[in-house]
Amino acid sequence: MGTTWSAFAVRGFRVLWLAGLLSVAGDQLARVALSILVFQRTGSAALSAAAYALSMLPALVSGALLSWLADRYPRRRVMVACDGVRAVLVAVMAVPVVPLPLMAALLVLVQLAEAPFSAAQGAVLPELLGARYEAGQAVQQVTTQLCLVLGFAAAAFVVTGVGAHAALAIDAATFAVSALLIRAGLGRHPPSAEGEGESGATWWRRSWRRVAAGAVAVRRDRTLGTLVWLGWLALFTVVPEGLAVPFAHQVGAGGGWIGVLLAAEPAGAVAGALLLRRVARPVRVRALGVLAVGTSAPLVAFWGQPTLGAALALLFVSGLCSAYQVTAGATFVQLSPPRVRGRTLGFARTGMIAGQGLGIVAGGVLAQLVGPATAIAWAGTAGALVALAAAAAWARRRPDAVSAALPAEA
């Protein structure tokens, strides 16, 4: 088994890692700020969840129309441009006089730039890391989740202390710094010859074909399709995140506990990722289905209307099992054909992000009708049932053979 931290020996990885952490930290401030702001003004769990979901739903459009840019233009240029656009838009959102409807529209535009950035980043990492790729994925998972833990835990206090608009200004600054880091510290990383030769005059006509190529590649390969299925299960387990504000209100917790609720699942994911890296890769690959079920199963206990302490424990266990996403994602990327890797990854990420957004919206509507705890319980029950089917499908893919087909770990 490779050393988890060996990816830091690669300079380009260090640049992308640091830039990513800055953006993640800023985004948590923005998400918590908007959720609290909407719930305070409306008192609606559905609208609060919808505001949170706005950071995810635009992927339905951006993934289809924009993720292919990672396979056409130099990938550093794509990432820098996306970060620059997001910095400007979030800076406008930070202006106090901007009304909520306009802030929501700007947030949609901000998220439209996420798909090409993520697709470009995902296509660059295998080139940078080679055999260290899964180690790099594990490092990103651990540190990103740790950043989420700290960011969520502090976000509610920061928003309360400096205000929602100041928190958005901080988010804008993180995008600007990320763009500068990538521009100065990462190589050009040109796209494939196929992408480089595409005529600019025809990109609107061909964009859907490019995304379809990624979807077709996934559909034709049952192993890739099952891995996508396992990844998209996150649409069920993200529901507690979108309902953190109304759930805290339901159990009578103060505003500071919102951040703790949001941090519980990422804290479990950090612990789970560290534990999984101590296990041989064939075992990790074989355990994907079991852990996928284990991610949703703790949420079923929300039928019992848990106290704040019990809810934190359940969310931590859910996050502990969710660390399987690192192995699932790394396996998917390494098995994807290199010439369409940006598109297959864009397709998979688009579906996951959009599914999470839809899951949060559905959870918010349900919470408005039956209460936040019961809505989380419904999500956990549905997720566990779907995960059982996905686990059975994964067992049929012969995980040991899949593991043997992967490049050797560094």
Image: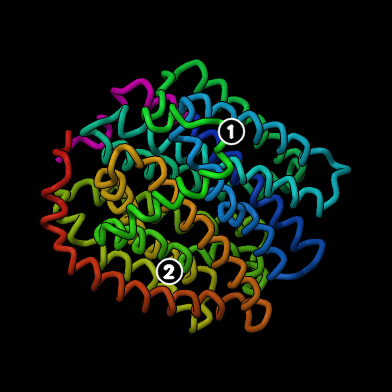
Callout 1 secondary element:
helix
Q: Secondary structure under badge 2? A: helix
Q: Residue at x 59, y 52 (%)?
A: 61
The answer to which image quadrant residue 22 occupies is: top right
| Residue count near mark 1 (Cα–Cα under 10 Å), binned few <14, some 14–19, many ≥20 | few
Q: Which residue is mark 1?
A: 201
- The quarter of the picture where the C terminus appears is top left
Spatial distance from mark 1 to mark 2, Cα to Cα?
52 Å
Q: Residue furthest right?
A: 97
Say what amino acid the circle numbered 2 marks. Answer: Leu
Residue extent of the magenta highlight:
1-18
Viewer-proximal residue among 7 and 272:
7
* Occupied quadrant, residue 25: top right
- As drawn, the label of residue 314 is 2
What residue do we see at 45% from left, 17% from top?
Answer: 185
Residue at 36 percent across and 79 percent down: it is: 385
The location of residue 50, given as percent across then percent down, is 67, 63
Is 12 inside the magenta-drawn segment? Answer: yes
Left-right relation of 51 to 5: right
Q: Could you tell me residue 275's position as x and y percent?
A: 25, 51
Looking at the rendered image, the quarter that the N terminus falls into is: top left
Q: Residue at x 55, y 81 (%)?
A: 374
Residue 296's spot in the image, x, y percent?
39, 70
The image quarter in which residue 313 lies:
bottom left
